[in-house]
Image: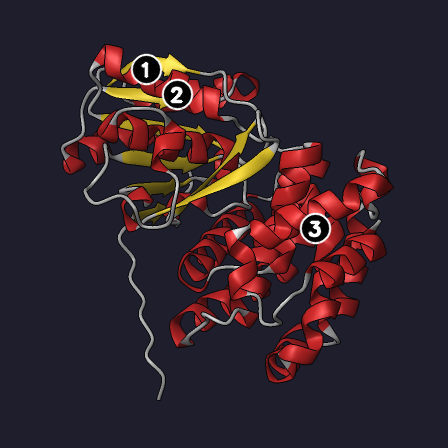
Amino acid sequence: MEFTEFRVTTRVMAGIDLVDSLDWELGRAGLDRGLLVTDAGIRHLAERARRAAPRRVVGVYDAVTPNSAVAQVEETARLAQELEVGFLLAVGGGSVLDTAKAAAIVITEGGGLLDHQGVNVLTRPLVPVVAIPTTAGTGSEVTAYAVIRDETARSKLTFSSEHLVPVMAILDPTLTVGMNHELTASTGIDALTHAVEAFVSTKAGPFSDALALAAVDGILSHLPVVLKDGSDIGARWQMLTASCLAGLAFSWAMVGCVHAMSHACGGLCEVPHGIANAILLPHGLEYNRVACEEKFEVLRRRMGDDPVAVVRSLLAQLGLPMRLRDVGVREEDLPALAELAMLDGSIYSNPREATLEEIVAVLRAAY
């Protein structure tokens, strides 16, 4: 019997209109003087959270962008330090949540964000982060990772530590009802990619497998529903919880080559993460098939058909871009993207030991 480990440290709550109970939940956790971290496009959703706990939120940073960058993390940290906050309240998608988590590093440890690169280099608890996701995709509200773009190097950096895990996650489907078709689809595929890659990862175990498969079930059953009727609050709730389950799974099992390539595309070519995953997932799965045939058979039974065929069929329904050339990637970028992918931490848990030439071939097939 192989060794396995699993732990959940985030207090996760899910419910309709749960954000309106934020003041009580923060008080129960002993949290006061928070900085609200969000992006300008969803400021109206963030304001709902702020209105729910007006005495506990003393400032707002709303300049987070997709593929959030080091400079935004450090700006967030500076404002938090000026206000002497006791916690960060992150309301938004994955970029917002990751920005807050990374800012917690700088607030606690000082210096700049790049001073703290590496895996498990943090040695003490960080300023607490409360995460309220407004998309159903990243699972960042429960993960030990923060992915931030280094604009100078044009690459994405992954920070990993048990201390990065938010102390509280509030899953309120009413905050996701306003997502448009493309964002709903791309974040849903991001969650599916987390679940599938976690399931076939070399670091997978029985606990992560159970969560990953539950996430696959939830996403395949409810993503088509919310794309047909975005106001279906029950299906939105199911997608939020499935995304969280996938986040819990990959927080311990990690992901694989699809994410390594997606991070490279986001860093070098600024392709949105969910879109990159959607394009690359069927190609990464096909590449990994020979290394995890037993896991593929489990997925086939769960999905009702060959996993690659199911993913391709789903993508065809979603109307997302299908090729890298359609999202601004140039053919001459492919070798550089492969080199970045080979340096990404996600590649080390891929079920098939990849070579640079093989990753170039996968990218070319997706091009």
Disc 2 secondary structure class:
helix
* Quadrant occupied by the N terminus: bottom left
Tell me how the rendering is colored.
secondary structure
Q: Which residue is mark 2?
A: 74
- Give how far across and how far down residue 125 sits, in percent: 20, 41
Give residue 78's mark. 1
- Give how far across and how far down residue 335 sits, in percent: 76, 47
Residue 290 picture quarter: bottom right
Task: Tell me if mark 2 has few (under 14), some (14-19) or many (20+) residues whose alpha carbon lies within 10 angstroms of its own.
Answer: many
Task: Give the camera-side residue of 338 and 275.
Answer: 338
Give whichever of discs 2 and 3 has the lower sequence position.
2
Task: Give the camera-side residue of 299 and 53.
Answer: 299
Task: Tell me if mark 1 has few (under 14), some (14-19) or many (20+) residues whose alpha carbon lies within 10 angstroms of its own.
Answer: some
Q: Is residue 249 left or right of residue 155?
A: left
Q: Which residue is mark 3?
A: 338
Task: Give the camera-side residue of 196 and 286.
Answer: 286
Residue 91 picture quarter: top left
- Amino acid type, residue under disc 3 in the picture: Ala
Disc 2 to disc 3: CB gap under 8 Å: no
Question: How many numbered discs?
Answer: 3
Residue 189 visible (yes or no): no
Q: Give the vertical position of 253 relative to 36 (above or below).
A: below
Q: State which mark lies toward you, 3 or 1.
A: 3
